[in-house]
Image (cartoon, rainbow, N blue to C red):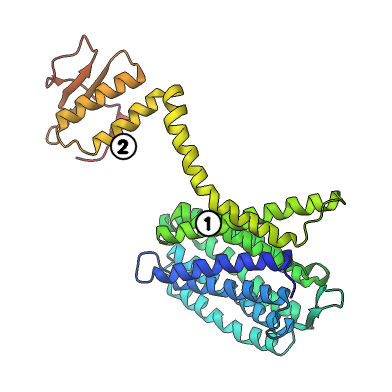
Amino acid sequence: MYFDISTIIPAIACVLYVTFTVFGFLQYRKDRFYWSFQLYMVMLSIWSFGSMMMHLNAPIMTPLFWNRIMLVGLLSVPYPLTSFIVDILDMKQVWVRWTISLSYLLIIPLMYLNFNGMIVSDAGFTAAGQFYYQLADGAVSAYSISYIYLIISVGLLLFAATSKRELEAKKNLVLPLTGVAVMLVGIFINVFPTLGKYPIDIFAAAINAVLLFYSIYKYKLINYSKVGITFLYATILLAVSSLIYLGILLVVQTYSVRVTFGNTSLIAFALGSATLIIVHPLRSFMLHLIDTAIVPRRHPYQVTVRSLSRRLTTIVNLQELATEVVRSLADSAKSEWAIFIARKSDEDSAFYLLAQQRCDICEPDGSKISFSFPAAVEKRLPAV
């Protein structure tokens, strides 16, 4: 078996996609659960797992066998991905959904070409331990069927998104589709065996996973639990830190003949694991140090505001709330004066002064005052 960078990259991608898949199924029957997304993750998991086993040269089966397992996921990815875009855009057109559903039939001829050796005719390792594969006559046709379909269908779907809700969802797809574009470049390299023997395609797929995770976290595309998000974050941190350490070790080993690290991949993984273990308590300690030592001395108003926000959760009386807010803001902001006014729900133009601090010209608390918002502000206020 060969455990090096060509094995680590697909292994990391496999862990990421399997994690997406497992925590995705745990959200079954909850809001924002999409079968299309789950199938998309399953296909990416198969792709990355097959690539890992193929580059590992595992004693279980042959590299050619794992290459064909890898191609099951690689060639099938475009179809659930397109379905997922339809779901995210919430397209209701029956003809669109039927067309996308029927496109899954294209997987049948692709699998026929795959398992009959018409895409990759041979794959294995040379005597020197170098991975190689040989494309068959049907390789270009197979890649073209899947990924020209993906490019055309995604382009048409985004062009057809015209409703306000669809346009808003389209903005949330920018990063996931950027990841898809990176993945397409990686897959295109497979057409050239000289470059394709390296796991460039699965590295591009790992970048896609990171962008997908960020989009899910930022835009709440999928309703993952806090535990799922934390686990995905930890996995990505482990992957990124391991790759950074591996790069540093390789550079040092290349330019220093006196330094030898043995198995650099295992050392990098160990250092990445150590980083993952210490980074959370280190981050908590640094935040505590900043909050207790630095912020109070340099930004005292932040301490006051933070203390106020904690007290506000227990105040239910409006007069007490007004007094507390005015006093805290006047002291923290060092303002010359501060007032708190409120509008009665049944009187649109009636405002009352509830509390004031250092305002010499103000009426007594509880007095009715004349006040009006500019027209532009008034339009944005919620109706009472």
How crowded is the residue under tag 1: few (<14 C-alpha within 10 Å), some, or many (20+)? Answer: some
**Furthest residue in direction top, as rendered:** 360
Label 1 secondary element: helix
Q: Amino acid at mark 1?
A: Ala
Q: Amino acid at mark 2?
A: Arg
Residue 289 appears in view: yes
Residue named by callout 2:
380
**Percent position of residue 59, x then y:** 71, 83
The residue positioned 67% from the left and 62% from the top of the image is 204
Q: Is residue 74 above or below residue 344?
A: below
Q: CA distance from mark 2 to mark 1?
A: 41 Å
Quadrant in the picture for the N terminus:
bottom right
The residue positioned 30% from the left and 23% from the top of the image is 329
**Percent position of residue 240, x then y:** 63, 54
Q: Which mark is residue 277?
A: none
Q: Quadrant of residue 110?
A: bottom right
Mark found first going from the N terminus, 2 or 1: 1
Label 2 secondary element: helix
Q: Is residue 244 above or below residue 293?
A: below
Residue named by callout 1:
234
Quadrant in the picture for the C terminus:
top left
The residue positioned 46% from the left and 74% from the top of the image is 97
Task: Kindly check if marks 2 and 1 are in contact, taking CB atoms under 8 A apart as contact.
Answer: no
The residue positioned 53% from the left and 65% from the top of the image is 157
Residues 378 and 169: in front is 169
Residues 370 and 181: in front is 181
**Percent position of residue 96, x then y:** 48, 73
Foreground: disc 2 or disc 1: 1
Residue 167 appears in view: no
